[in-house]
Image (tube, rainbow, N blue to C red):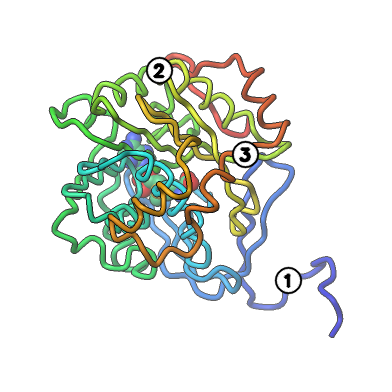
Amino acid sequence: MKPFSFIRKFPKNSKWILEFTQGPHSAHLFQVKKTLVHKKTPFQTVDIVELFRYGKTLFLDERLQISQADEFLYHESIVHPALLTHPNPQKVLIIGGADGGTAYQTLKHKSIEKLFLVDIDAQLIKLCQKFLPEINRGVFKNPKLKVMPADGRKFLSETREKFDVVISDLTAPLLEPPSYLLFTEEFYRIVYDKLDKQGIFSLQADGANHINNKTFAAIHKTVGKVFPIVKGLRVFIPSYDDCWGFIIASKKYDPTLLEPTEIKTRMEKRGLKGLKFYDEKIHQSLFVLPKAIQTAIAKQKRVIKDNKPLVSFE
Ligand code: SAM
C-alpha cells in the first residue's frame, strides 16, 4: 500500500479539523469520523467530535482539550503526583475540568471525603456528561462530588472552605475570558490562602518542549512568587503532539522527594488502582526536565499579573 503522501486534495465528502496550536504557521490535522456537538455557549465554542485517530475529542475555541484515546495521560498526571504527595487528602477543589476526567481520577483516592468541581460553563458540563461518558465514567453521579457552575476565581475568593489540594484544570490563558485571570500572581495568592497548612496546588501549565515553553516558564515563575516549593513535570500526550507541562506547588511537601516505596504504600492504603500510566516507578521521572526547559525556567523574568496577563502563543 502506498505510504501516505502529502495531502494535495482532500478526498470528496471527507471532514477534517486543522488545529492551530502554536500560532498561524503550523497546525495539527485530524480527520473527523462524526460530529457530535457544535455549540456556542456564553463562554466558549464547544466542539465534540469523533476522530478516526483519537476517538471522542473535546475542542474549546478550536483548541483540543482532551481525547478519549489518551485522556488518562493528562488526568493521571494532573491528579496523582499531587494527591500522593499530600499525606491524607480529604477535601479537594477542581477549577475547570468540565469533562470530568480529573474528578474521576481524584475520587479513586478513598481518602477523599469531599470533592468540589467549579467550572464556569454549566452548558459544557451537561454536554460532557451526555457525550463524553468514556472520559467521566459516571463520576458526576458520585455523592462525594459537588459540581458548581461558577467562575473559579470568584468562587475561591468568596468561599470559607479550606482545601487539602486545589487542581487547576483550565483552558489556556488566552487574552479574552474566561481563564486568563486564573494564571496570575494575584490568583495564586488566593489559592495559597484557601489551602491548608500542608496544602498542594496542581495545575496544567501549557506545552513544555524545546521550542514552545515560554507560557510554562512564566507560569512556573509566577507560582514561585507565592509558593515555597514549585516543581514542573511533563508528559508527552499524542493527541496534543506535545510534551504537556504541569506544575505542583506545595506549602510543605516536595513531590520530587516522595520515594517509590512510600508512593506504593499510599496507593495501597487509598485503594488506588486501575491506572493506565502513573505508578510509583514513573513518579520521579516526570519531574526530570531537559536542560532547555530548566534554562527557560531559570531565565524567565515574567511574573504574570492581573494588569499584565499572559497570552499563549507568545
Ligand atoms: N485539558 C485541557 C487543557 O489542557 O487545556 C483543560 C480541559 S477543561 C475542559 C478546561 C475547562 O476550563 C473548561 O471546562 C472551561 O469551561 C473551564 N474554565 C475556563 N475558564 C474558567 C474560569 N474562569 N472558571 C472556571 N472554569 C473555567
Quadrant observed for ligand 1 in the rendered image: top left
In the rendering, which numbered label is found on residue 226? Answer: 2
Question: Which of the two labelled residues, at mark 3 and mark 2, occupies the earlier sequence position?
Answer: 2
Residue 220 location, x and y as percent? 52, 26
Residue 44 appears in the rendering: no
Which residue does the numbered mark 3 point to in the structure image? Answer: 288
Up-down relation of residue 37 to residue 124 (above or below) = below
Instruction: Give me the residue at 22% from left, 34% from top.
Output: 163
Q: Distance between the residues labelled 1 and 3?
A: 41 Å
- Is there CB contact under 8 Å for labels 1 and 3? no
Question: Which of the two labelled residues, at mark 1 and mark 2, occupies the earlier sequence position?
Answer: 1
- Is there CB contact under 8 Å for labels 1 and 2? no
Q: What element carries label 1?
A: loop
In the rendering, which numbered label is found on residue 157? Answer: none
Up-down relation of residue 130 to residue 83 (above or below) = below
Amino acid of disc 1: Phe
In the rendering, which numbered label is found on residue 10? Answer: 1
> Are there few (<14), some (14-19), or many (20+) residues within 10 Å of tag 1?
few
- Is there CB contact under 8 Å for labels 3 and 2? no
Instruction: Give me the residue at 40% from left, 37% from top.
Output: 202
Amino acid of disc 2: Val
- Figure quadrant of residue 53: bottom right
Question: Which of the two labelled residues, at mark 1 and mark 3, occupies the earlier sequence position?
Answer: 1
Residue 59 location, x and y as percent? 48, 55
- Decide which of 111, 125 is in the foreground and name it: 111
Camera-side mark, 1 or 3: 3
Q: In which quarter of the image is the C terminus?
A: top right
